[in-house]
Image (spheres, rainbow, N blue to C red):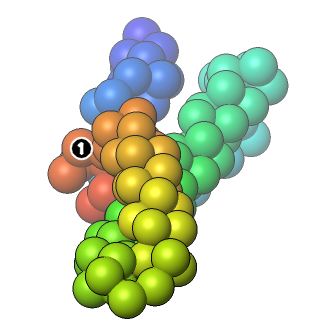
Amino acid sequence: MKEQAEITRFLTDERFQYGQLTVKEKLIQLKEKGSIDEEQFDKIQDEDILLKVKYTTYKKCVKQIIIALGLTLIGFILINGSPLGSLFIIIGFILAISSFFGITSNRLTKIQKVYLKN
């Protein structure tokens, strides 16, 4: 009964209270004992992989929005003297909009970020 409660804890968001390495070691121990089946083990591993992808995408979008703001600023500076300024503004706005939606859809909680770093 205790092992089943432990498995359930790892299948929910409660596993974010522990470090990622701790969870991985505990899952391997449970798998070796035969307490957890292959499907549950794979599900947790897949969720962790998707969480890593989500975090890297979030960081990438933050960098892109900074670049977009820079392009837009350069475009506004160059708008009077060059037609290239309009191009910078348009590219900056498109990049900023797509990055904004990337940031909002890939946002992680603080607990999840700590989980990934440990």
Q: Residue at x 20, y 51 (%)?
A: 110
Q: Which of these two is toward me, 33 or 43?
A: 43
Report x, y in % for residue 80. 31, 82
Q: Is residue 66 left or right of residue 44?
A: left
Left or right: 24 as drawn, with respect to 39? left
Q: Position of residue 23 (x, y in %)?
A: 47, 49
Q: Which residue is mark 1?
A: 109
Residue at position x 40%, y 46% in the image = 97
Q: Which residue occupies 76% across, 19% down?
A: 39
Residue 109 sits in quarter: top left
Q: Secondary structure at mark 1?
A: loop
Residue 79, quarter of the rendered image: bottom left
Amino acid beneath label 1: Thr
| Residue placed furthest toward the left | 110
Q: Quadrant of the C terminus?
A: bottom left
Q: Please determine whether, in this image, residue 71 is positioned above or below residue 50.
A: below
**Horizontal side, residue 51 vs residue 112: left or right:** right
Residue most toward the right?
A: 38
Q: Is residue 113 above or below residue 104?
A: below
Q: Nearer the viewer, residue 63 or 86?
A: 86
Residue 49 picture location, percent across and down:
64, 47
Residue 93 visible at all: yes
At a point 48% along the width and 23% down the height, the residue shown is 11
Q: Is residue 80 left or right of 34 when viewed as pictured?
A: left
